[in-house]
Image (cartoon, helix red, strand yellow):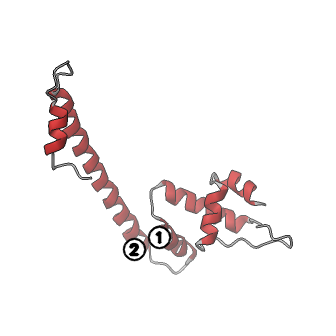
């Protein structure tokens, strides 16, 4: 299977597949003409990587998860540690987004939205320190 077929099969852009090859996540063999040949093993890895990335795992974590997946003597505690760390990061982002939403909602409600120049939204943006950049 060539790279465009692999892209269709996995849902990954060919550019992403080339990048994964460049950084050593997948290493498809080359045909005599130099073209990549994707077999079941490479497709499985690419699908695994696509799903891990869809869950928001960083490439570094994807590399570790893929290595753990391939290691039959792995400890599930190692996998859980990576997933728990990522889950904590997601929960922190959600808390930040909720705080941003609440702050912005308050500012929007405080603004009359009329022809006067006084704008609580601009003043709030200027003085709000509870929202992280």
Frontmost residue, 30 versus 110:
110
> Outermost residue, right direction?
32
Count of residue discs: 2
Classify 10 Å Cα crowding around label 1: few (below 14), some (14-19), many (20 and above): few
On residue 60, which mark appears? 1
Q: Position of residue 75 (x, y in %)?
A: 45, 77
> Which structural element holds mark 2?
helix
Residue 111: image quadrant is top left
Direction from residue 41 to residue 78 in the image, left or right: left
Q: Position of residue 66 (x, y in %)?
A: 54, 70
Q: Which residue is painted at 19% across and 34% down in the image?
A: 121
Vertical position of residue 117 compared to residue 96: above or below: above
Vertical position of residue 85 compared to residue 90: above or below: below
Q: Position of residue 15 (x, y in %)?
A: 64, 58
Direction from residue 85 to residue 9 in the image, left or right: right
Frontmost residue, 93 versus 35:
35
> Which structural element holds mark 1?
helix
How far apart marks 1 and 2 lie (CA) works out to: 18 Å
Q: Which residue is painted at 75% across and 73% down in the image?
A: 29
Upstream in the sequence, badge 1 or badge 2?
1
> Outermost residue, front direction?
117
Residue 108: image quadrant is top left
Frontmost residue, 54 versus 31:
31
Q: Which residue is painted at 86% across and 70% down in the image?
A: 33
On residue 77, which mark appears? 2
Image quarter where the N terminus lies is: bottom right
Q: Position of residue 59 (x, y in %)?
A: 49, 66
Classify 10 Å Cα crowding around label 2: few (below 14), some (14-19), many (20 and above): few
């Amino acid at each position: 299977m060539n790279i465009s077929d692999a892209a269709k099969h996995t849902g990954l852009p060919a550019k992403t597949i080339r990048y994964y090859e460049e950084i050593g996540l997948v290493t498809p063999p080359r045909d005599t003409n130099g073209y990549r040949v994707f077999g079941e093993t490479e497709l499985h890895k690419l699908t695994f990587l696509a799903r891990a990335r869809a869950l928001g795992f960083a490439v570094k974590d994807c590399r570790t998860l893929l290595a753990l997946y391939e290691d039959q003597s792995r400890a599930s505690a190692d996998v859980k540690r990576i997933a728990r760390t990522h889950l904590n990061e997601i929960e922190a982002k959600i808390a930040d987004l909720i705080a941003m939403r609440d702050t912005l909602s308050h500012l929007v409600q405080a603004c009359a939205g009329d022809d006067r120049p006084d704008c609580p939204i601009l003043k709030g943006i200027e003085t709000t320190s509870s929202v992280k950049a």
